[in-house]
Image (cartoon, rainbow, N blue to C red):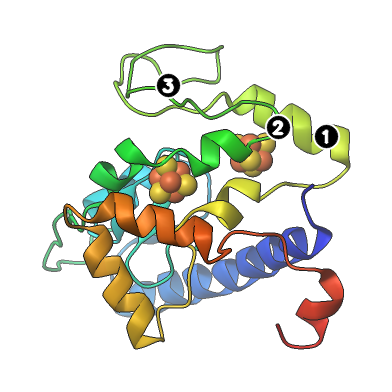
Amino acid sequence: MPSALSGAATGFGYSIDALVVLSLAQYIRNLGYNAVASLNDSSLAVPTAIKAGLGEYGRHGLLITKEFGPRVRLGKVFTDLPMELDTPIRFGVKEFCEVCRRCSDACPVGAISAGAPSAKRYNRSTIKGVRKWSIDGEKCFGYWVSQNSDCAICLRVCPYNKDYSRWWVRAGRRVAGTRLRRLMLWLDVRLGFGERMKPRRWWQGG
Ligand code: SF4
Ligand code: SF4
């Protein structure tokens, strides 16, 4: 089941996101350049973030960052401010997703493919002509509507959804990027990561 708490966290993230991109755009305009703030509008956020080196693409169709895993909300600022460009990074997510099916197994409506990346179109909401792990966005959103809430089950179960302020979690991420990835996936399940936390426990500080 999705959790209202995760929905609230998502809304809170976007609220801060709006504040950050609007402030940044205004700052750039004050420097004398053009700047337009944007959240999930105007261009696709995930490919932009991947090109900007913020993370890799996951089977669940989300950005996976090194610092926060898939637990991020994206914002953009379009500008003509001259700056150095970042480049895409790799830390083994694609190879890990090839052996992991935690998100596709957990999705309550089967909106996430368990197969290889493909150019298959589920419906008009699927991007045309791109070979990738696409999710069936209409199935996903239909589920949200049926629950009167949004859903973050695929984020919760993702092995990259961890607190990277802990050294042993960072070490695990490094190992997950090697040939020992299947062992890390097995450990993830054995140690109970990705299980739903009871709301009472969350309110008591986890
Ligand atoms: S948000 Fe929920 S319904 Fe949508 S893809 Fe993820 S697990 Fe499936
Ligand atoms: S749950 Fe597994 S397969 Fe899905 S995005 Fe996360 S690492 Fe990749």
Q: Position of residue 35 (x, y in %)?
A: 37, 62
Is the C terminus in the top left, top right, bottom left or bottom right quadrant? bottom right
Above or below, 112 relative to 185:
above
Circle 1/circle 2 CB separation < 8 Å: yes
Looking at the image, tell me whether mark 2 or mark 3 is earlier in sequence order: 3
Residue drawn at 73 percent across, 67 percent down: 197
Residue drawn at 34 percent across, 42 percent down: 97
Q: Which residue does the numbered mark 3 point to in the structure image?
A: 127
Q: Which residue does the numbered mark 1 point to in the structure image?
A: 145
Camera-side residue: 152 or 108? Answer: 108
Residue 109, image quadrant: top right
Locate residue 3 relative to residue 42 in the image: left or right. right
Camera-side residue: 112 or 167? Answer: 167
Looking at the image, tell me whether mark 3 or mark 1 is earlier in sequence order: 3
Circle 1 sits in a helix, a strand or a loop, which is it?
Answer: helix
Confirm if mark 2 falls within 8 A of ligand 1: yes
Camera-side residue: 137 or 52? Answer: 137
Circle 2 sits in a helix, a strand or a loop, which is it?
Answer: helix
Q: Position of residue 34 (x, y in %)?
A: 33, 62
Mark 2 burial class by Cα count in 10 Å: few <14, some 14-19, many 20+: some
Above or below, 56 relative to 27:
above
Q: Which residue does the numbered mark 2 point to in the structure image?
A: 141
Residue 125, image quadrant: top right
Q: CA distance from mark 2 to mark 3?
A: 16 Å
- Label disc, if present, on residue 72 of the rendered structure: none
Above or below, 118 relative to 6:
above
Q: CA distance from mark 3 to mark 1?
A: 22 Å
Q: Position of residue 101 (x, y in %)?
A: 46, 38
Q: Does residue 123 show up?
A: yes
